[in-house]
Image (spheres, helix red, strand yellow):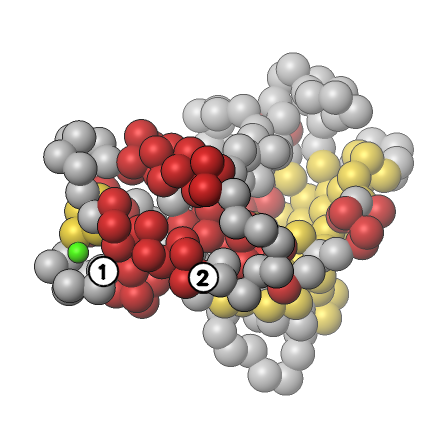
Amino acid sequence: MFLCTKLIFFLQMFNLLTMPMNGEKTEDATEEVKIEVLHLPNECDPKSKRGDLLNAHYDGYLANDGSKFYCSRSEKEGHPKWLVLGVGQVIKGLEIGMMNMCPGEKRKVTIPPSLAYGIHGSGKIPPNATLIFEIELYAVTQGPRSVNAFKQIDLDQDKQLSRDEIKHYLMEDFKKDDKPRDLAREDWILEDIFKKNDHDGDGFISTKEYNIYQHDEL
Ligand SMILES: [Ca+2]
Ligand SMILES: [Ca+2]
């Protein structure tokens, strides 16, 4: 579990994960997400914000008949899901509904179709469906694209990440893994990191290229 989480974190640092619950883009600004707080812990720190890495369980229901279409507890041996907030990893309404949330808080969030799967629906979700999610948030942690993550990788502190620096970080981070190292896979990950992040193709990932969440200044 620990290593699995670590790998997910690393891949999210460089945008290498596919986005499983992407909703439709929509311009309808008249509809809003309704948030009901079901449980608020006494201590609320830190509150979730854009770019944070969250750990949560959530169940999804169709508002019209109350049927459950999604349950994170029945996926992946029931482990809570890790997701980065505010980067399009989940539907827009869920991102809005999980902002400023405390670790330990429970919410019921009602999401209009324009902030979910829109006029077309998706899979089990029919067209124009209002969705209800019951969310339990367990942890709010520093997101993968944080200042600290960048500084950890940037060994010579020149504010850009070279191939060697990322390779070194990748090796150090997974040294404790008892599986044999897969050098071909590591090379592939490295290539993919540069393909997706080195936008000007100069062979380095700059602070600007890296810091896409822009909630921290480097
Ligand atoms: Ca550097
Ligand atoms: Ca670059």
Measured as percent of width and height from the top left, residue 192 is found at: 38, 33
Is disc 1 placed on a helix, strand or loop?
loop
Type of residue at label 1?
A: Asp
Q: State how far apart marks 2 and 1 are (Cα).
A: 14 Å
Residue at image position (51%, 78%) is 45
Residue at image position (72%, 37%) is 131
Is disc 2 placed on a helix, strand or loop?
helix
Please, which residue is most extreme toward the top here? Answer: 120
Examine the image and state in which quarter residue 62 appears.
top right
The residue at which mark 2 appears reads as 173
Numbered circle sitting on residue 180: none
Task: Give the quadrant of the N terminus.
Answer: bottom right
Examine the image and state in which quarter residue 118 appears.
top right
Seen from the viewer's position, the closer of residues 15 and 41 is 15
The residue at which mark 1 appears reads as 154
Type of residue at label 2?
A: Asp
Mark 2 residue CB less than 8 A from any atom of ligand 1: no
Please, which residue is most extreme toward the bottom here? Answer: 42
Seen from the viewer's position, the closer of residues 11 and 103 is 11
